[in-house]
Image: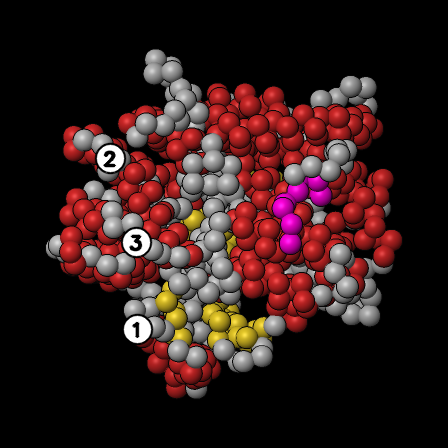
Amino acid sequence: MNRSVCRADSPRTDRLLPHGKSRYCRVDMKSISLLISATVCLAISGSTTTAKESNRDQANSGEVNGFASYRQKAGEFNAVLQLPEFETTSKEVKASIKGAIKQANARLDQIGKLKAREVTFENTIMALDTLLFHADKVANRIYLIKETHPDAEMRKTATRMIKQYQNWKVGLDYREDVYQAIKAFADQEPDLHSEDAKLLKETMRDYRRAGLNLSKSKQSEVEALRKELAGLTTDYDSNITKAEKALHFSKEELAGVPDRFLSNPDIKTGENEYTVMANITWHFMTVMENAKKESTRKRLQIARYNLAKEKNVPLLKKILKLRAQIAAKLGYDSWADYRIEPRMAENAAKAQDFLKRLQDGLQPKFKEELAAFRELKADDTGRSEPTIHMWDWRYYSEQLKSERYSVNTEKLRSYFPYSQVLKGMFEIFESLFGLTIQRVAPPYKWVDNLRLYVVSDSDSGKPMGAFYLDMFPRKGKYNHFAQFGITPGKRLSDGRYQRPVVALICNFPSPQGDDTPSLLSHQQVETLFHEFGHALHSILTEADYKRFSGTSVARDFVEAPSQMLENWVWEKEVLDTFAAHYKDPSKKIPQETLQQMEAAKHATIATWYRRQLAFGLLDLELHDKQPSAQSWKPVATSNEIINDVFLPVPEDTAFVASFGHLTGYDAGYYGYAWADAIAADMNTVFENAENDYFDKEAGRRLRNRIYAPGGSKEPNELVQDFLGRSRSITPFLRSLGIKTEDRN
């Protein structure tokens, strides 16, 4: 299953994913933990209307027919386009998981009964991919309920059933009868090509990585540890989702915070009382970037860094110890080496070296930026040598943009009303990729402002897939920004192609009536383009197998196709197509303002990246080889690295307790910077194209050579095919202001 794909820092805050947690995030077909697409939020926002009642009401109004026409159209292209039917009761949740496991076991039994002379590609390797496709589709829905449903009993039931599914999925690796049938086919050394050959190779690699080459007793030990690990990571994720912290401030304490924020009825909770939720990203970001009082910022930062602390620190110790034990039993030096083996970096040493070189390269600029922040803080406080704390950098980054570059982030929001940005983004990528994006009525709505869109090929009219938009925060909902797969693309046994269904789950500022729409910051616009890139990557897939569908690529490559699309929101010609003042559409962002925005971005880029590198390095360190006698101290270890690479962590806080990337992206956070390097290189295709970011030829090339293949080819092959040359890190280093000779 796929977990969410997301930005590392949405909007440049702790990312997928969800996720996104992306949180995106794909793992091996037989993953250690259940990495399901986290999140179409199944919150019904207080409504007690059942799915069947909702469907009936909409059918009576004629709305349902919109999607039905696309489903029928898909059939003309030998394709299947279906929407999921979400469970609405605990009883249905239990029945769905039990049914999925029962059906999958029956299919596994069929494989396991095969004689050596009977095995074929179709009844072994392909059959395994197919049974996982059907089982994971069910588990995806239940995981969404677990993470986002407003009813506590539903979440509790879903959590319990997901644990059952995790245990089953770990256990299927150790079905000796199935393994022997698949091995019998592999031993024939069949003459397979392209995607078929890759599927066989990676299936056998999965069995090796699960320990099927070990003795029976050691296999059993690994299986038991993996099942225990799967349960603990589920609890860890759930604790983060459930963690809430409300802080109450007076208006004086929130001096500098824009009225747009303070007037929100969910925030203004008294005559002079404002409630800020530390766990809601846009609340946190708005206050940290604008609050003049250091005490306010400090209080909120500490609350944010203590989310889920009491429950997750003990869990994380157990998780890290289990991972180390599993890696050792499988013959790896560390969990990091185990996890990175199938990725582009290949091993932990190479990933760590990449981050360390960036850390060193950014040191001079990072030092300059901190000096600029101290100068601003000195003016504020009257202290000659003030310290820049963790709770200061966002605020003084914004002050630097405003004072030195005349960039007012809050005023820029007026140019980015959500609906206008969404419409403009669709039009850009419709033209670029040869698509048509059409809104249709969802047959079932779990929240009133849910939207559903169908993506079709503009030339042929072929439906390519569908995506939901659930874009504003509410209680119980996943609280970051991510794309999550629901139904993966796959060639079915009857030859038809299952078109994908995904969801974008975001938490943009809610609209405050007709007069004040949802207004996005420029960073949030960048986030929207990023997440929509993941949706396109998923929907435009043509991979034959579920394992390679869309974003199911190497973890340290998966962000690159989306990170590249962030460049579009920095181009004047692109912004002019949709960025206009919501009260006066004739007003566009001036060229000089955009130039200042770019200058401001580069003025603080080292600070932002050093934070990312700190997270990547602590992730690798936590999963590096540990002396057996050493006690596991994830909080002390991670805080020490953040202190060294970035800024001092507030005392007695535990950032890692709510660092959701430690499940799903474990030993993989380095992949964001790694993918940024690839994205910068890929972006040169558009920079050098005749029509720049509107170049249709370059757009079709991206669609056909990166998005369509998904994981059916190795990332280096995909990138080289797209670039027409070997990849280079030089464009990325230059974008960071690191001078270097051209090198690969």
| Residue shown at the point (44%, 25%) measured from the top left | 624
Compared across the picture, whether 32 is left or right of 673 comes to left
Res. 709 in view = yes
Q: Is residue 377 above or below residue 537?
A: above
Q: Provide the residue designation for mark 1.
A: 494
Q: Tell me the quadrant of the picture where the C terminus can be found.
A: top right
Tell me the distance, in whole angstroms, between the alpha carbons under discs 3 and 1.
23 Å
Tag 3: amino acid: Pro
Sequence order check, earlier mark of 3 and 1: 3
Answer whether residue 563 is magenta in the image. no
Q: Quadrant of the rendered structure where residue 331 is? A: top left
State the image coordinates of residue 527 (x, y, percent, origin top left).
61, 53
Sequence order check, earlier mark of 2 and 3: 3
Q: Provide the residue designation for mark 2.
A: 213
Magenta region, residue range: 724-731
State the image coordinates of residue 114 (x, y, percent, origin top left).
14, 56
| Residue shown at the point (38%, 16%) measured from the top left | 627
Nearer to us in this view, 580 or 622: 622
Q: Provide the residue designation for mark 3.
A: 190
Q: Is residue 338 above or below residue 472?
A: above
